[in-house]
Amino acid sequence: MVVSYHELKVLSPAKAREVVCKVLSQNQGNVSRTAEILGICRRTVRRARDGRRQDRSRRPKRSPRRTPSAFERLMVTEAGRTHFRYRRLAAYLKRKYSLSVSEHTVRAILKRNRIARVTRKSATGERRHLYDYEALVPFAEFQLDTKHLLDQHALPAGVYDHMYQRGLPRFEWHLMEVATRTRFTAYSYELSAAFGLLFIVLVLAWLRAHNVHISIRIRCDNGSEFCSGSGKKLAEWNRRLASFQAVLDPIPPGAKHLMGLVENAHRVDDEYFLMIHAERCPHAYAFLAKAQGWQDTWNFYRPNFGIAMRGVTPSETLKATKSMVHQHVLLFPVMLLEDAMKVAGSPQQLLQGGPGGTYVYTTCLRQNYTMVY
């Protein structure tokens, strides 16, 4: 098989130029004859005769718009540490270092430095959205879950020991709104169905008092703090929640992926809240003050890069929907459910008081906590 000069140059430019020099030597240095034999121009023959065998770099001698090498090394370091892709990394660099870099520039730098993309797949290997995010209406879909705060696998030993010795709350109750990623949070020292219903009622009453009038669906797991997989108990809870036009919809057993949004938020709680602020809390009410600041930061200032969020905050997302719901709804008071039970009584008593009475109660509770802090 005969290989032409152009095919050989693709494989090895140095070998191609060696062939040119060899043919040129066989023809007593006749440039025109060599060019005719190889099917190339005479300038190519002279370049092979007089120049270097290897191709010269096509990199420009001056790149005035190139990102400084120090910034490029910083991006590569942070990309390897955080595993963020270009969009999240650009926003992260702006928040942490006040470094404004285009997403396209960050993407080019990651590609140039061959930073591998960390891909995450579901258990079945498929990536399917849980909701039609473009069609979601704010405060129509929620995910409800609890988090064990004393987790030795998630927390450093010092943080775990401090929370245990200082008697800080043991459990977090977390209700996340899907469309805007707004979070509503409470804490307790024990898990019980009474606290589960109380927390749901408090959040629903808060929403109804802030002009949220649409029907609400709440997804939760089958834990003992909710309905424990009991159809009778679920029917009783939904009967009580019907006055708020809300329905509790437990996920099928083993389908934990349907709670992906609230589960991912729990990991963020460990990394950005508990690991940093828990050791600064000498008692439970100082912890609640920090938790209130963390919830307000999440709802108003922390950009979210989840599906359809595009790096904006829940507050900005709610404002962009141009709904009639005021942003004050995001200021839900973080509370200790044991205190709420003492003051408000049972969830049934709160249901009898209606949304207005519960709103007054939660507002006063937040003011009382503020004075304690």
Image: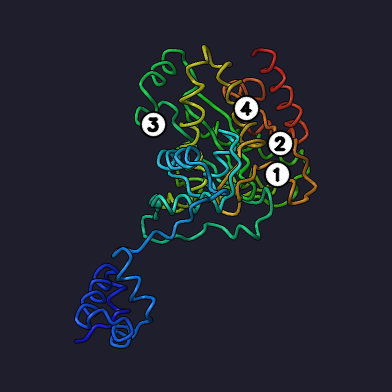
Give how far apart the Cα atoms at labels 1 and 2 are.
20 Å
Circle 3 sits on which residue?
154
Q: Return the x and y of residue 15 as percentages of the image width and height.
A: 24, 70
Circle 4 sits on which residue?
334
Which label lies toward us, 1 or 4? 1
User: Which amino acid lies under the numbered mark 4 shown in the image of this protein?
Assistant: Val
Which quarter of the figure is the N terminus placed in? bottom left
Circle 1 sits on which residue?
316
- Residue contact at pointers 1 and 2, CB within 8 angstroms: no
Q: Nearer the viewer, residue 81 or 275?
A: 81
Which quarter of the figure is the C terminus placed in? top right
Which label lies toward us, 1 or 2? 1
Circle 2 sits on which residue?
206
Q: Residue at x 72, y 31 (%)?
A: 358
Q: Is residue 351 left or right of residue 93?
A: right
User: Which amino acid lies under the numbered mark 2 shown in the image of this protein?
Assistant: Trp
Under tag 3, what secondary structure? loop
Q: Quadrant of residue 332?
A: top right
User: Which amino acid lies under the numbered mark 3 shown in the image of this protein?
Assistant: Ala
Under tag 2, what secondary structure? helix
Under tag 1, what secondary structure? helix
Q: Residue at x 30, y 71 (%)?
A: 49
| Residue 172 visible somewhere in the drawing | yes
Q: Check the image and report above or below for 89 versus 129.
A: above
Give how far apart the Cα atoms at labels 2 and 3 are.
32 Å
Circle on res. 123: none
Q: Return the x and y of residue 224 as percentages of the image width and height.
A: 45, 38
| Residue 223 visible somewhere in the drawing | no
Q: Quadrant of residue 154?
A: top left
Q: How is the image coloured?
A: rainbow
